Image (cartoon, helix red, strand yellow):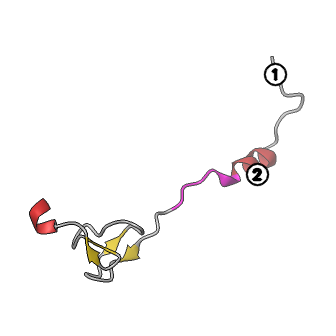
Amino acid sequence: MAVPKKKTSKSRKNMRRAHDFLTTQSVSVCPQCKSPKLPHRVCPTCGTYKGKEVLDVAKAS
């Protein structure tokens, strides 16, 4: 059974956990309707992606 030979200090423990944190999602602005949207995804309000209408929002709702 694996047992640590020495006690892990608070500093060592916190250095190990330095990368375990949550990051916020980046939000971009739709060029058509100027509403916030996730990058590389269809705009949920106007249904456009890269300047083309991909989704008919009036029909979908």
Q: Quadrant of the C terminus?
A: bottom left
Q: For this view, does 19 lie left or right of residue 50?
A: right
Nearest to the eye among marks 2 and 1: give it.
1
**How many other residues sit within 10 Å of disc 1, few (<14), some (14-19) or many (≥20)?**
few
Q: For this view, does 32 lie left or right of residue 11?
A: left
Judge whether residue 28 can be spotted in this image: yes
Residue in view at x 84 percent, y 34 percent: 7
Q: Is residue 52 above or below residue 23?
A: below
Residue in view at x 29 percent, y 82 percent: 34
Q: CA distance from mark 2 to mark 1?
A: 22 Å
Report the amino acid beneath label 1: Ala
What is the x, y in percent for residue 55?
Answer: 21, 66
Magenta stretch: give its range: 18-23
Report the amino acid beneath label 2: Met
Judge whether residue 61 can be spotted in this image: no
Q: Is residue 2 above or below residue 23?
A: above
Q: Which residue is mark 1?
A: 2
Residue in view at x 31 percent, y 67 percent: 42
Q: For this view, does 25 lie left or right of residue 19?
A: left
What is the x, y in percent for residue 18?
Answer: 69, 54
33, 60: nearer the viewer: 60
Furthest toward the top, the residue is: 1
Secondary element under disc 1, as helix, strand or loop, is: loop
Q: Is residue 22 magenta?
A: yes
